[in-house]
Image (tube, grey):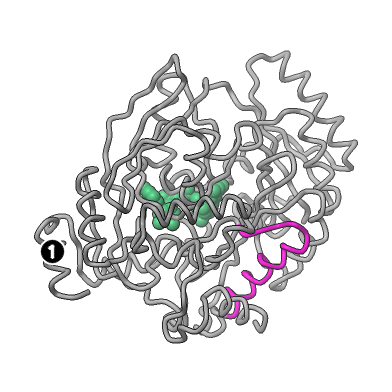
Amino acid sequence: MKKKTRTKFVRYLWKQMKENATALQIYSRDISKLPNLTKLLFNRTPDGIILPRTVEDIQRVYTLATETKTPIIPRSGGTTGFGGSIPYNKGLVIDCKGLDRELLIEPIDQTVTTSPSIIFSELQKKLKLQGFSLCSYPSSYYSATVGGWISHGGHGIGSIKYGSVVDQIAEMQVVLPNGESQTFNEKEDISLFFGSNGTLGIITEIKLKIKFDIPLKQFGCIFDSPVELMKGLKKLQEVDPFSVWFLNPSQVLAFNDSFGYNLPRSYVAIVSKEISYEAEELAFSNNFNNTIRKAGGQILDKRYISDIWDFRFKTFALLKEYPDFLVSEVILPIETSAKYLRKLAGLFEGLLRVEGELISNTHYSLLLYLPIEEPISDFKKTLLILKINKHVLKSKKIGGFPYSTGLWFAGYYSQIYGKEMYKRYKDFKKKVDPKNISNPGKVCSPKVRFFPLFKLKFVIRMASEFS
Ligand SMILES: Cc1cc2nc3c(=O)[nH]c(=O)nc-3n(C[C@H](O)[C@H](O)[C@H](O)COP(=O)(O)OP(=O)(O)OC[C@H]3O[C@@H](n4cnc5c(N)ncnc54)[C@H](O)[C@@H]3O)c2cc1C
């Protein structure tokens, strides 16, 4: 960053700016640490980090950034593995976690107005005290924020009943890259920000739809093969579940290791249902058992259920036990993906762990992660990342697509959200950010640093093919 540009930011925000080497290093990665080889493609070390406290701070940051053509990279929990919150080519990371706002629960409308930086577990705790609950949430519940979830394009536990995050936003306030603060309350407008990875501005306030805190009861089942699992995912929709969450065989083994159990190497699914009365539970239980049998599955012994259900929040802790790990996510159609799922189970010597969530009548999401038990070379790590991404992209053949764009999948927006949506996105982006200062390099594929004849999407795809 030029000295003159730095001075402009420091003059206004000196107390809220960090430039020390440790901070720069922390903010140059998200949940997964990128290999050094990727420096050939992107320069991910920021010039500085800004911790805004108010909407006015963000407006000022965007005004200065537009004047000086400085890239602005919004960041909250930093829990995605798609590179959305790390710089593509330097710039200032805006850590939104300092954006505070008093929580306002409106019982009659069943909404909560909150800062986007609130972590899901904290928000849920506050809602529960008043008899309400989140409609759905990601399994990164203890570290992820509401604002980051919208920008990543979130689905989660509860999405089969209550939809994706777009269906749950009643209103939101955004500081656009042109410095204007605007409120959006039409679903059409709100959907523009879904999966936009902070390229359309910084969300500063959210009014989220909430629900009464109806007790959730869990039921478990086992499927021997992906074909049966897919049959199960289809049939289970008939019982109107709150969520259907499942583990692949290698994640079941990780669960066994953690809890000292001996569950078979198969697909284990936990179904959650909102149930208020005992009689309702009994009726549901009978219905559930019949449904699972018809799908070719078996009922899971009750003694495992609460531990497996708690396990949905343990992934983070488990990952931290390894010297390194790789993460990715993909969305797949139920109808055509059984073979693909079987193939995933056999990759990487059977070590790829998978957690799935039913997100609609037709699709489910998969969180893929590969723990790396022994330190490996930078080159080998790069190959492994490319290989995982290759399999995510290969899902196109069966109607699948990457979960979000971020940096790794920049250029795949229309595959994820459709061509019409992409046109709306691009028109809006041009209007509010003509100089492309808000999170450049994300969503739309940028040119490669040292080989500007090529786009990042092309280079990553070619490298993946040869991995
Ligand atoms: C173990 C694990 C489980 C996960 N489970 C799920 C899941 O069930 N469902 C799911 O959807 N995801 C899941 N994720 C991915 C991720 O944790 C979530 O999407 C999370 O909500 C992202 O929030 P964050 O605060 O960490 O965002 P960040 O990682 O900080 O940012 C994500 C994107 O949003 C942008 N951004 C951040 N804050 C703002 C803001 N205020 N305004 C505008 N843009 C902003 C960033 O630039 C970036 O592009 C999981 C990840 C892991 C590691």
Please tell me whether the stretch drawn in magenta is mainly helix, strand or loop.
Answer: helix
Residue type at mark 1: give it. Lys
Q: Check the picture and name the quadrant holding the N terminus.
A: bottom left
Relative image position of residue 458 (x, y in whole percent): 58, 77
- Rate crowding at label 1 as few (under 14), some (14 to 19) or many (20 or more) other CA atoms within 10 Å: some
Q: Is residue 22 left or right of residue 419?
A: left
Identify the residue at horizontal 70%, vertical 36% (top origin): 271
Q: Which span is picked out in magenta? A: 383-402
Residue position for label 1: 8
Who is closer to the viewer here, 171 or 357? 171
Q: Is residue 317 visible?
A: no
Q: Is mark 1 within 8 Å of ligand 1?
A: no
Who is closer to the viewer here, 283 or 109? 109
Identify the residue at horizontal 84%, vertical 54% (top origin): 225
Q: Quadrant of residue 221?
A: top right
Find out whether residue 249 is within the magenta segment. Answer: no
464 lies above or below 433? below
Relative image position of residue 301 (x, y in whole percent): 76, 37
437 lies above or below 361? below
128 lies above or below 150? above
Q: Check the picture and name the quadrant holding the C terminus.
A: bottom right
Q: Element at badge 1?
A: helix
Q: Is residue 373 left or right of residue 301?
A: left
Relative image position of residue 397 (x, y in whole percent): 77, 64
Q: Is residue 25 left or right of residue 127?
A: left
